[in-house]
Image: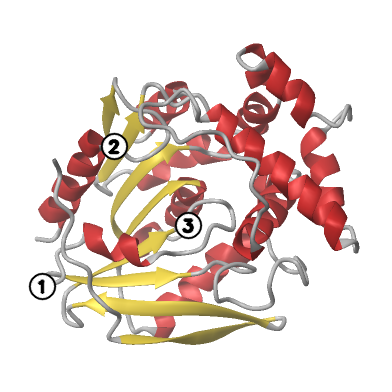
């Protein structure tokens, strides 16, 4: 099994005022003089977790974690406001955080939505990125979103009938429900959304049972932000992330994906690798969207190699 590094605690942390009333939580761990690396969590809106630190050799890396706008410890919480919360704002936040921490260039890593954010950031600021390591590849195209929340009904018709609201755009309809002032409405919508997310990943090796448990505040933030972002296709021009991958030429990149990932079909990862000169695509035939020992081993190996 791929062994993660031992748990570590941050040596510094704080909140960065990024404007418009937003304050993002950040932390640094590992070696203050080590190679800088920033970890971008998924979702949108899942928040960072202590386990993310363990992919890095603490003697060689300066690991930066943050909670993107609206989730985790950042304020305001998404249930209070999603104002000034777009992909463009998140990219600007990363630059402000880099400058705040006095980092010249850093490795960027993330998974799922974190992949999209990592790529958009790197395409705008390639001179600030040393390497990119991403997994569960998603570029947040409208066709990817449509597949996830509509196309997959071909695999789970009975569950999709339970999930769909009968709207022309279920994602936008859920976004409206998550903005409802009634907490009970938000709770029901978030529970239905989370159940569908579980169903989509239910065929993967080791998948837990689909749950109807009530959702907590973290899950409410995740659904509010996911529906907010996906209803707007991340405020990205369709196909722009892959179209502009040529800007990443010269930046070493490792793309890690599971062939059994129904939520993010491997075709997107392949298209990105074809458009990104020098990128390395690693596909595990026996895993899906979630972490696996093989994919974890590939990520650890890439990060160890890039530690220099």
> Any mark on residue 7, and which?
none
Q: CA distance from mark 2 to mark 1?
A: 25 Å
114 to the left or right of 235: left
Rendering coords of residue 191 (x, y %): 71, 46
Residue 238 appears in the rendering? no
Q: Is residue 230 above or below residue 128?
A: above
Q: Is residue 288 above or below residue 27?
A: above
Q: Residue at x 51, y 33 (%)?
A: 209
Give the image quarter of residue 261: top left
Q: Secondary structure at mark 1?
A: loop
> Label 3: few (<14), some or many (≥20) within 10 Å?
many
92 to the left or right of 237: left
Rendering coords of residue 17 (x, y %): 58, 86
Q: Residue at x 40, y 76 (%)?
A: 98
- Write down the residue under mark 2: 292
Q: Is residue 117 above or below residue 135?
A: below
- Write down the residue under mark 1: 59
| First in sequence: mark 3 vs mark 1 | 1
> Label 1: few (<14), some or many (≥20) within 10 Å?
some
Give the image quarter of residue 109: bottom left
In this rendering, the label closer to the viewer, 2 or 3: 2
In this rendering, the label closer to the viewer, 2 or 1: 2
145 to the left or right of 175: left
- Write down the residue under mark 3: 121
């Amino acid at each position: 099994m791929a062994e993660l590094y031992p748990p570590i605690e941050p040596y510094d942390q704080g909140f960065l005022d990024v404007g418009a009333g937003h304050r993002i939580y950040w932390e640094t761990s590992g070696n203050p003089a080590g190679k800088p690396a920033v970890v971008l969590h998924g979702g949108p809106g899942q928040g960072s977790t202590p386990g993310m630190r363990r992919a890095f050799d603490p003697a060689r890396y300066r690991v930066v974690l943050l909670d993107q706008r609206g989730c985790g410890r950042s304020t305001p919480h998404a249930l209070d406001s999603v104002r000034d919360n777009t992909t463009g704002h998140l990219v600007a936040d990363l630059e402000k955080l880099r400058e705040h921490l006095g980092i010249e260039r850093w490795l960027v890593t993330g998974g799922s939505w974190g992949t999209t954010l990592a790529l958009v950031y790197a395409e705008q600021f390639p001179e600030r990125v040393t390497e990119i390591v991403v997994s569960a590849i998603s570029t947040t195209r409208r066709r990817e979103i449509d597949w996830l929340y509509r196309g997959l009904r071909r695999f789970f018709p009975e569950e999709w009938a339970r999930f769909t609201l009968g709207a022309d755009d279920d994602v936008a309809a859920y976004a409206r429900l998550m903005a409802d002032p009634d907490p009970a409405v938000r709770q029901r919508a978030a529970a239905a959304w989370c159940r569908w997310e579980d169903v989509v990943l239910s065929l993967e090796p080791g998948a837990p049972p689909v749950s109807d448990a009530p959702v907590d505040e973290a899950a409410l933030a995740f659904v509010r932000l996911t529906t907010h972002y996906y209803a707007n296709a991340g405020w990205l021009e369709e196909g722009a992330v892959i179209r502009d991958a040529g800007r990443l030429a010269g930046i070493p990149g490792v793309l890690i994906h599971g062939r059994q990932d129904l939520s993010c079909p491997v075709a997107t990862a392949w298209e990105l690798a074809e458009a990104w000169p020098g990128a390395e695509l690693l596909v595990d035939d026996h895993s899906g969207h979630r972490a696996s020992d093989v994919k974890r081993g590939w990520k650890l190996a890439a990060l160890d190699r890039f530690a220099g």
